Amino acid sequence: MFTSKSIFLLIAIIVLLAIAWNTDISTVYIFFVIVFVMFVLSFAHLYFNTPDIEFKRDVMDTAYEDDILNVKISMKNKRVISSYFFEIVDTFTGAPPEEQGKSLFVLDIKAKQTRKINYVTNCYKRGLWKIGPVLLVSQDALGFFKSKKTLSVVSEILVYPSLFKIFSFPPLASGSVSWMGVETANISGDSHEFFGIREYQTGDAMSRIHWPSSARHGKLVVKQFERNAVQEATIIFDLKKGHDIGVGRETTLEYAVKIAGSAAKYLLNEGALVQMIAYGKKNSIMIPFGKGQSHMYKIFEKLAVVQADGDMTLVEALEEASFIAPHRSTVITIMLDNDMRALSSLIQFKVKSIKLIIIVLSTSTFGQGDEGEYLDIEAAKKFDEGLANLEAYVYRISKGDDLEKAFEPV
């Protein structure tokens, strides 16, 4: 409550009182009274002007990086007297570092009045962030005393990673799964071949009933088809601690997350089945195959919070993926250009006739990693030879690249 001004004023009161007491000079007594009254009135003004506010905040639950967030505030003065000139500081940890405390000044709020205030802030970085608590700051007219009160009004917002537009992507491998005679959503490029028959089930289309077999068996039988052109993509990237190189939003992890999310969105919009694997410590991603908007946002929710805090290497993640990636599917790997072991591990997917798409992040352009691994000329040559042996489709990404252009068709 006390400020440097009020402490100085209090010292002045004590000094004036001591001088007046010892000298009995009336002028000093007058100064003492003036300063003492100023001290008391300032304290009283602060006491009666300290607001008692009921605070509510209205804000969206989700956003993307770089979105402008509109925060709506409703304040109700619970006191029977008005309050004047106080400050509201609303904290948003997901804003840019220099803008995380939003300061708003309120000139006055009448007794029992409700006022609404809006402010905007920027969603700087992906993550699950808190908005709040709220700090109310008030002071007397002369600035001798200051009061601070914290209101535990906290909102949460999930900020998805920013995405970029992918206009085309290398063709995925096409596998096949049983259609089972049940109507499902169409995928562009599907083709169907007769596979067999089975007993009718609720929901089967009447057009799929095989009438000769139904007559012969005395019950409804439907034709079973095989869908030949299903496309399945497994996206894998690294969350091992120490493998996140760079600062702020310009790190290998942030690029990997952005690329993984953008690729997943593109493939899901094209009708492919997508699964994603990334092993962290606190927030791993193990999302099985799915399709559609709900599956896409399930992926975005996971990508919003992952951190490079895991113990598993990309090699171990690829080993796990080799058991769940189907034959004749596609594996999309986002990796560092100094991870020779992961590059060697990718060869196992060729045995299963799995198509490889590899996004290579140039570590030297992002900075020094925790493990201090750099590619010398000889190691870079071996890495390039290993890529060539995989017969994969390769994207090379450096810090500062325009990702939309990097994924444009050649």
Image (cartoon, helix red, strand yellow):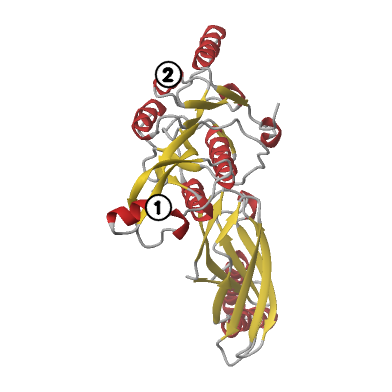
Residue 223, relative to residue 325: is it above or below?
below
Picture coordinates of residue 282, whole percent (x, y): 37, 45
Crowdedness near tag 2: few (<14), some (14–19) or many (≥20) residues, C-alpha within 10 Å? some
Vertical placement of 54 versus 223: above or below? below
Q: Is label 2 or label 1 in front?
A: 1
Q: Tell me if residue 253 can be seen.
A: yes
Helix, strand or loop at label 1? It is loop
Q: Nearer the viewer, residue 268 or 226?
A: 226
> Residue 261 lies in what quarter of the image?
top right
Residue drawn at (52%, 49%), measured in percent from left and top? 300
Place of residue 92 in the rendered image (x, y in percent of width and height, measured from the top left): 57, 59
Placement of the C terminus among the 4 image quadrants: top right
- Looking at the picture, how far across and down is residue 406, in whole percent? 67, 30
Q: Is residue 346 left or right of residue 368?
A: left
Amino acid type of the residue tagged 1 in the rendering:
His
Q: Quadrant of residue 366?
A: top right
Measuring 59% from the left and 57% from the top, which residue is drawn there? 63
Q: Quick one: which residue is furthest to the left in this view?
A: 217
Give the Cα distance between marks 2 and 1.
Answer: 45 Å
**Which residue, given by chain and number where applicable, does mark 1 sit on?**
210
Q: Residues within 10 Å of mark 1 (few under 14, many from 20)?
A: some
**Residue 85 in sight:** no
Of residues 337 and 265, the one drawn nearer to the viewer in this rendering: 265
N-term mark: 2 or 1? 1
Where does label 2 land, which residue? 347
SS at mark 2? Answer: loop
Residue at image position (65%, 82%) is: 115
- Type of amino acid at the residue the image marks with label 2: Ile
Tell me where residue 163 appears, x and y as whole percent. Answer: 62, 45
Relative height, residue 395 to residue 71 (above, below):
above
Examine the image and state in which quarter residue 341 appears: top left
Q: Foreground residue, 386 or 348?
A: 348
